[in-house]
Structure formats: structure tokens, C-alpha cells
Image (cartoon, helix red, strand yellow):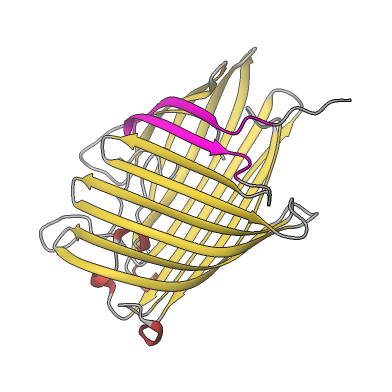
Amino acid sequence: MSLIPADRHKFETGIGYATDVGPRLQFSWEMPWVNRYGHSMTNSLFLSSPEQTFEGEYRMPLADPLKDSYVLEYGVAIVDDDDETSNETTVRFGREWKFDNGWQQKIYLGASYDDFTIASDTGQVFLLYPGVSWTRTRTRPKAFPMWGDRQKLTVEYGNQIWGSDENFVWTQFDTNWIRSIGNNHRFVARAGIGNLDTDNFHGMPNSKRFYAGGDSSVRGYSYESLSPEDDDGDDEGGSSLLTSSLEYDYRLTGDWWGAAFYDAGNAFDGWDALELKTAAGMGIRWISPVGPIRLDIAHPFDDDDNDYRIHFSIGPEF
């Protein structure tokens, strides 16, 4: 038996489209093995009209290299959208555990610097925060799951005591479920909840504020268009988030499916200001050679200016 070393470098490119961000490109560079200690590195560049993001990860395995490792994450995100401009740099270092039951736990220390303008808020803010996250994703098959679920809970805490410009507790939980009856009936449900507790909301960057609306949120409303507004009517994000969706898919023929759905959600300033926006619609799903393609037409029930909105996206649901 002879062994052949894996390629030292792997490169991938991808192209996609979504009504949220328009055309998008992705370039990735992976080094599965950097040195004799089993370190690995991955870098990815995402390009779209409103947002350009560079993300990287350097992984250092420990005694059980498949389940236990140190991880250094770094990235730069540049956003130039209607009511928002942002230039954020982020670094996180932590330890990651993968358990036999499929759950993944990560404990980390993060730091970010953001020069931002959001509606009438302008500032430069440095945040230093410990965080913890738990994630599990299960799907079968992967291309267009007939069964699966994804859970993710993240909690981050910043305090001026250790050098963060702002005190805050940021929490977000997302859950997605796919179940089916036979080979022709498929049900998709998802929900998300988030909360930002801080004594200076207007000094917080966009990455810690909440918005709703868009392809993977409340369809019928444009991307991140649901949020509290300032005195000039510009979206400034909210300190709380609640979204939910129910969808039924029926196989029309072969790889073509029809869909009917109902979405609800919003971002708002505190739970006492909870006011959900709702929408319903129908769509088409095609399991194409490049991945699932989704086309939805949604009617918003709480938007007097628009009777419907078209959503189009390519790629897996989670």
C-alpha cells in the first residue's frame, strides 16, 4: 500500500444570486495541512454589491484532532447600503469541541473595531468580549434535505472593565427544522430570537443590532427593511428580534416542487415594543445540478406601498 499526500492548496470559486444582495461571488483558499503538527487554514472572500467580506480560520488540533482544537478566526467586512456604512475588523481566538451527539461547542475571546454610520448614528467602537456558542446541524440528503434540523445559540458579553468601549450582552438563537411525509410532502419551519442588552444602543455597531426582512427572514419585505426608524425615517436596527416561518412543499414532478408559506417577524426596541409584520406567498423549488433554486412571490400584509415582492435565491437552506 502506498499513500499519496493530500494537495497542499485547494482553491474554489462560486457564483450565486439572491434578491437580498444581488449577484454574489465567492473565492476560497484552503490549506488542509500547514505543517507537521496538523494545523490547517481556510480563507474566503465574498463579494456582493452592498457587502464585501473576507473571512479566515487557522485551526490547531489538540489530543483528539477530529474533535478538539484551538481556532483563530479573523475577518474584515465592508458594508455600503442604503442607511448604513460600516468597516469592521474582527479577531476571535477560542477552543472548539465536537461531541459524538453532533453538537459543537466553542468558547472564545473576540475583539472588533468598527467605523460605522447607521441612520443618524456615527461612531468608532472597539468591543472586547468573551463568547460561547453551541451548534448542531443534521441533514439527509445534503443537497435538498427531506429530513434535518439546525440549532445555534450564541452569547457574547462585553464590559468596560477589561477595555471594551461598551457594556453589552448579545444573545441570538436560531432553530430550523425539515420533516417530510413520504417522498412528496415536505415541511419547513424556522424561528429566530435575539436580544441586545446595553446602556448605549446608539454606540453599538451594526453587527450587534437586529434587522428582519428578506429571503431567509420575513419574505414580502426587502432585505433588513424591518427595524425601528430614527426621526428621519432611516432604519437604525433594533435591540430585539423575533422571526418565524412555516412552509409546505409538494413535489410537482421529478426535481420540481411547489411551496406555500407564512412568515412573521420584526426587529424592535425592547420586548414591550413587540409588533410582528406578516406575509404569505407561494413559490417554486428546483433541485438543479448547482444546488436548490428557490423562487418565491410573497404578499406583505403590513406594507401599504407594496402588494407583493419576488424573492430568488440559490443554495441550501442551512
| Whole-percent x, y for residue 138 in the image | 70, 43
Depth check, front residue: 202 or 259:
202
**Which residue sits at x=34%, y=62%?**
209
Quadrant of image for the N terminus? top right
For the point 38% across and 44% down, which residue is it?
Answer: 54
Res. 181 image quadrant: top right
* Residue 215, image x, y percentages: 41, 37
Q: Residue at x 63, y 27 (%)?
A: 143
Position in image of residue 31 (x %, y %): 57, 39
User: Does residue 275 appear in the picture of this structure?
Assistant: no
Instruction: Give whichever of 115, 251 is nearer the camera.
Output: 115
**In this image, 54 relative to 258: left or right?**
left
Position of the C terminus, as image quadrant, is: top right
Question: Residue at the spot x=36%, y=44% of the render?
Answer: 53
Please say if 152 is above or below 269.
Answer: above
The secondary structure that most of the magenta stretch takes on is strand
Q: Which residues are magenta?
A: 6-34
Query: Is 271 located above or below residue 160 in the figure?
Result: above
